Image (tube, rainbow, N blue to C red):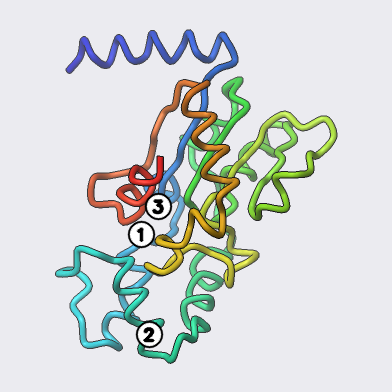
Amino acid sequence: MEAKLIRFIDAYAKAIKGNNAAIFAGAGLSIPAGFVNWKDLLRDIATELNLDIDKENDLVAVAQYHYNEKGNNRHKLNQLLIEEFSHGTSVTSNHKILAALPIQTYWTTNYDKLIEKAIEEEGKTPDVKITQENLSTNIPKRDVVVYKMHGDVSLPDQAIITKDDYEGYNEKKQLFTTALQGDLVAKTFLFIGFSFDDPNLGYILSRI
């Protein structure tokens, strides 16, 4: 494992020097800052549905189940996102390290604003892409592009959270999928903040 790690560090360092490095950040990057993980986000909703969230493996299906039970009304899901990801919190040391690196491309499934906040604190200008419309415009003199492929707390009604959202992603957000596929071909990625039981990861990998 140590030899593999050394080889990875060497390859990624070369990618950074060649301006070909990218970051893909999952929920694990933001949890140390005080934000909830998926299970805690959906805990109250699961209880309302008489489910034990700690025994559920498909958390995206739990969100979908609640959406269906509420007559296709996602008000409570939207409110949860606002309540859990709008409160003020400081960026972590990992955010600061990533923002300080000469990396120009960040992809994330996180709804919070910590990545762009860390980039701004580093004195850089982030161009944040939340909707497909954002992809067609560029901020002048930007230093970094942050692709928030599952949405942002500022637009909770458009956030990707239910199973329908994930399964219809390619239809509704095809430009994000295309952009990510292009970056995966052209850049060397560091995936950080993901685990093998992360509800997002399977859907992401199946798309790309």
Residue at 53% x, 64% y: name it.
Answer: 159
The reply to whether residue 106 is in sight is: yes
Q: Quadrant of residue 158?
A: bottom right
Q: Residue at x 54, y 50 (%)?
A: 149
Farthest left residue?
Answer: 55
Labels 1, 2: front one: 2
* Label drawn at residue 68: 2
The local crowd at label 1, few if under 14, some if 14 to 19, many if 20 or more residues have their Cα within 10 Å, is some
* Residue 192 spot, x, y in % from top left: 39, 36
Foreground residue among 77 and 32: 77
Mark 2–mark 3 distance (CA, rounded to whole Å): 28 Å
Mark 3–mark 1 contact, CB under 8 Å? yes
Residue placed most toward the observer, 193 or 174:
174
* Element at label 3: helix
The residue where tag 1 is placed is 37
Amino acid type assigned to the residue bearing label 3 in the image: Ile
Q: Residue at x 72, y 40 (%)?
A: 127
Image mark for residue 31: 3
Q: First in sequence: mark 1 or mark 2?
A: 1
Percent across and percent down for residue 131 are 65, 55
Query: Is 18 on the left-hand or right-hand side of 56?
Result: right
Front one among 180 and 58: 180
Which amino acid, by three-letter code, is at mark 2? Asn
Q: Is residue 111 visible?
A: no
Q: Which mark is residue 192?
A: none
Which quadrant of the structure image shows residue 38? bottom left
Q: Is residue 124 left or right of residue 12?
A: right
Tell me which label, 3 or 1, sits earlier in the chain: 3
Q: State how far apart marks 3 and 1 are (Cα).
A: 6 Å
Q: Callout 2: 10 Å neighbours few (<14), some, many (20+)?
A: few
